[in-house]
Amino acid sequence: MKTHHYIIAGATTYLLFLLLLTPAATVISFLNIPEKTVSLNGITGSVWSGQVAEATIKKQSVEAISWSLNPLSLFTGNVSTELQATVFENQVDGNLNYSYINNATTLYDISSYIKAENLQKLLNLPFGELAGSIKLDLNEIIIKPKALPSIAGDIRWKNAQLTLSEKISFGDILLTITPDDQGNLIGKLSNTKGQLIIKGDIKVTPKSIYTLRLTLKPRANASSELISILKLVAPRKVKDEHVLNKSGHLRQLGIKL
């Protein structure tokens, strides 16, 4: 190897060594992340391995974020890392890529689990008692400033139950979400087992306007209380199915993006 090759290799190694030791807070301050999109607090550790006590992404709080990354990704205009975080007091595992060229944050291979009763308490839902377990398997979430997040993946609610004066079982509920070419989010809702056959289509536009169409058909084992609820929330019937159509802004559902 020629002398100048040794010099280049030595200088590169030295720069990488310095980068590894650079405090994470110092590097993140140079990324110029828009505060209205992502807010970070309690940054500790180095670029190579560090933690964020709390991050607010699109007004949603994420806690106890830890990462371990290859600092070479910084030279490509991106920060790519495996990560762990806590959302709604439950661990989330996945991968993150942040581009400080177009300010886009991409989360992929995201998985998490939460009990329905815990989610009800955290969201302060006032009606009945929810039960079952909710599993998130999200292939990709793309977050850009002033835009509806692009989401692709599945949300499964196993052994879904609602207890009012008596227990109502909805079986296993599946919501599949995909983005389309116009920037809309498209959701397909279905279930298996339980006292009710559920089929639904959900659409959310880039302006956070949603439209929902549900068809609800009682099974033979449907309770009298469930049938009474269906007559109340979805009085319109087509043959033996109750039909529910709703639309509006996500803010009306308490969802702020």
Image (cartoon, helix red, strand yellow):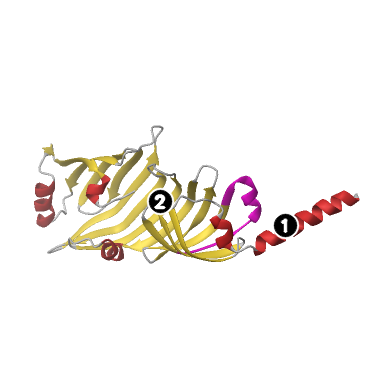
Residue 97 lies left or right of residue 8; in this view the side is left
Inspect the image, locate mark 2, and give the three-letter code of the amino acid beneath it: Lys
Q: How many other residues sit within 10 Å of disc 1, few (<14), some (14-19) or many (≥20)?
A: few
Disc ID at residue 203: none
Direction top: furthest residue: 182
Task: Please tell me which residue is depicted at 10% across the width and 56% down the height of the picture.
Answer: 225
Q: State the residue position of label 2.
A: 36
Is residue 26 shown in magenta?
no
**In the image, residue 15 lies at what x, y percent?**
72, 57
Residue nearest the viewer, comparing 24 with 257: 24
**In the image, residue 235 lies at what x, y percent?**
10, 43
Residue 123 picture quarter:
bottom left
* Stretch of the chain drawn in magenta: 64-79
Inspect the image, locate mark 1, and give the three-letter code of the amino acid beneath it: Leu
Is residue 75 shown in magenta?
yes
Residue 47 lies left or right of residue 222; in this view the side is right
Disc nearer the start of the sequence (1/2): 1
Q: State the residue position of label 1.
A: 15
Residue 104 lies left or right of residue 88; in this view the side is right
Task: Please tell me which residue is depicted at 29% across the width and 45% down the height of the picture.
Answer: 189
**In the image, residue 68 lies at what x, y percent?**
58, 61
